[in-house]
Amino acid sequence: MKNKRLGSDFDDFLRAEKLLSKTEAAALKRGFAYPVQLAMKKRNISK
């Protein structure tokens, strides 16, 4: 059976709106910041 979904994917939409690189950059920053935030909270360290 073929893929039931039609149309493009979300990356294609972001690329067409010229938002893909900004979105990927934000995701990387959040992916890095979250574990740091958790570690700081665990050790009671503030910014």
Image: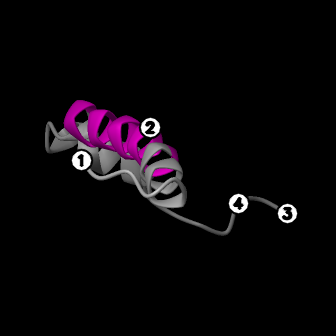
Residue appearing at x 39%, y 54% in the figure: 10
* Secondary structure predominantly adopted by residues drawn in magenta: helix
Tell me the residue at 34%/37% (across/down).
29
Percent position (x, y) of residue 41? 45, 59
Q: Between disc 1 and disc 3, whose residue precedes? A: 3
The alpha-carbon separation of the residues under discs 2 and 3 comes to 39 Å
Whole-Å distance between the Cαs marked 3 and 4?
A: 7 Å
At horizontal 40% and vertical 36% (from top left) the residue drawn is 28
Point out residue 9 in the picture as x, y percentages from the top left corner: 45, 52
Q: Residue 44 location, x and y as percent?
A: 43, 58
Q: Amino acid at mark 2?
A: Phe
Q: Which residue is mark 3?
A: 1
- Please report contact status of discs 3 and 4: CB closer than 8 Å, yes or no: no
Q: Amino acid at mark 1?
A: Lys
The residues bearing labels 2 and 4 have C-alpha atoms spaced at a distance of 34 Å
The amino acid sitting under disc 4 is Asn
Number of marks in the rendered image:
4
**What is the residue that sits farthest to the left in this orientation?**
17
Instruction: Identify residue for label 2.
Output: 32
Q: Which residue is mark 1?
A: 47
Closer to the camera in the image, 35 or 47: 47
Which residue is identified by label 4?
A: 3
Indicate which label's residue lies in the foreground, 2 or 3: 2
The answer to whether 12 is drawn above or below residue 2 in the figure is: above
Q: Answer few, some or many: residues within 10 Å of disc 1's Cα (few below 14, many 20 plus, some between 14 and 19).
A: few
Determine crowd level at label 2: few under 14, some 14-19, many 20+ residues with C-alpha closer than 10 A: few
Q: Which residues are magenta?
A: 21-35
Front position among marks 1 and 3: 1
